[in-house]
Amino acid sequence: MNQPIRTRSEVIDRIIPALQHVEVHRRHIDDLKPNPRNARTHSRKQIRKIADSIKRLGFLNPVMIDETGTLLAGHGRIEAARLLGLQRVPCIQVEHLTEAQKRAYVIADNKLAQLADWDRDRLAVELIELGSLDIEIEATGFEVGEIDILIGEHHDKQEDPDDGFEDLPALDRDSAAITRPGDLWILGAHRLLCGSALEAEAYQRLFEGELADAVFTDPPYNVPIAGHVQARRNGTHPDFVQASGEMSSEAFTGFLSDASGLAVAASRSGAVHFCCMDWRHVSEAIAAGRQHYDALLNICVWDKGTGGMGSLYRSQHELVLVWRVPGASHCNNVELGRHGRNRTNVWRYKGLAGFGKDRDALLAQHPTIKPVTMVIDALRDVTAVGDRVLDQFVGSGTTLLAAEACGRVGHGIEIDPHYCDVAIHRWQQRTGRKAVLASTGEPFDIVSELRSGPSGSASGEHHGRCSPASDLPASGLLASDLLGSEDCSDA
């Protein structure tokens, strides 16, 4: 019977001879025998994950065997190797252990690993950084739902919880826009194109051969804005460029269908598309979607917590249609709350009607702004870190901010140059970084100076500025007062 080891020299005397004989050999998988005393079990899901890791990264952890080829450690890796069809695997043959020590090692190899824990903040930072590198984050073995919870916890510690209704530069319609039609802006990892959601070329320029993994978009609702929605004292929001009450029901259905068809063409199979709509026009949205999607997965209700104006009933909600692109199953990170994401089809996020004195300044930048946190949660439900998210009606840029916050890559199209400016200002203020014009490499503030100068004005080019929202006077009737905002447009 082995005597207990009491001194450092005894430890060295025991370890050094063993280390001298450690060599890695490639052995045929049929020569290896499972250990009949192994009490550790492996689910098929775990085996698939191990196999996926081997396929992505290589067989980096040799299995341990004794002189007879019996496994001491690595039963799961051998099953994964068989699943992959591997014939030879790296092995380390252990010859210095007694039978009793072998049996103890088989247990210890599994049990000791269970005693470790994670530094959750450090792990979250590592996962965030991996998401921006050229590697699929699932190679870590973590599920997408687990990753998002870790990253969400980390962000909550780093900054105050933010509903996305922050004090931001307001839309200034008295000056021309800095952005010009056709401009492509680079916002860190994200891209914003000033163009039409109804033109295929816009999607081609935006994605350059890539495909969207999801869409979250808030198209105009085909209701008039000018003269109905006041942005500040003595002023109203102008009509949106498209679908601002001028279309018949049939024309609006066609408008939504054309936009949906192009979004589907720019997406991978199985991508989930979220499309916001008001109760008055949900029938047109459903009719348009059924022409392109293979499933209406759900209709979610955004409960704003406070009712706006209304005739018979004050409206407190908007609808979000959840569609699936044909050709594959969709990503489901909720899985009935398995990773802590206990989600229903009622989304409770405070709307602007509950923001008192700040509401006027916030709505000066856009009449129907959506909560960033609501979009973040939707993206976490159906995408992974690093996935591409499209919004073809960017408006004030909420989807781009949500993508930034949860580690997705935002791609946006907005036809109105003024709203492109608002989206850029929001992203710059939130991140502290500068948007860059793709065609010249110049940052937004330099482009603003160049286009606002005498030469820009003389040539009739767009120029303009954004005024701090806090400088704006109080407003009267606002978009959120019109049936809870759901009768207006994109965020």
Image (cartoon, rainbow, N blue to C red):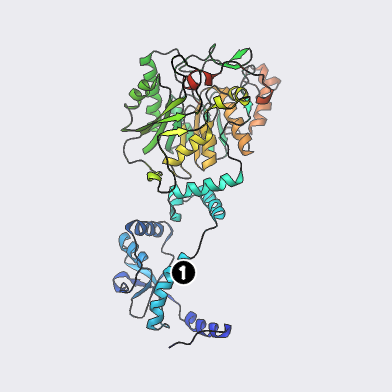
Q: Which amino acid does label 1 sit on?
A: Leu
| Residue 214 falls in image quadrant | top left
Q: Nearer the viewer, residue 238 or 434?
A: 238
Q: Where is residue 28 in the image (x, y as percent from the top left)?
A: 32, 71
**For the point 44% across and 76% down, which residue is it?**
23
Q: Is residue 441 visible?
A: no
> Mark 1 packing: few (<14 Cα in 10 Å), some, or many (20+)?
few
Give the quadrant of residue 63.
Answer: bottom left
Where residue 318 appears, x then y in whole percent? 44, 26
Name the outermost residue toward the left.
30
Q: In this view, does 107 lie above or below 289?
A: below
Kindly identify the residue that appears in the image at 46 percent across and 69 percent down: 112
Which sits in the foreground, 70 or 269?
A: 70
Residue 395 spot, x, y in % from top left: 52, 26
Q: Can residue 458 be seen in this view?
A: yes
Question: Residue drawn at (54%, 11%), measured in percent from left and top?
Answer: 227
Q: In this rendering, would 362 be left or right of 403?
A: right
Quadrant in the rendering for residue 67: bottom left
153 with respect to 109 (left or right): right
- For residue 194, above or below residue 142: above
Left or right, 357 with reference to 490: right
Callout 1: helix, strand or loop?
helix
The residue where tag 1 is placed is 112
Numbered disc total: 1
User: Residue 312's x, y, as percent?
Assistant: 43, 15
Instruction: Residue lying at the far right in this picture: please name it.
Output: 454
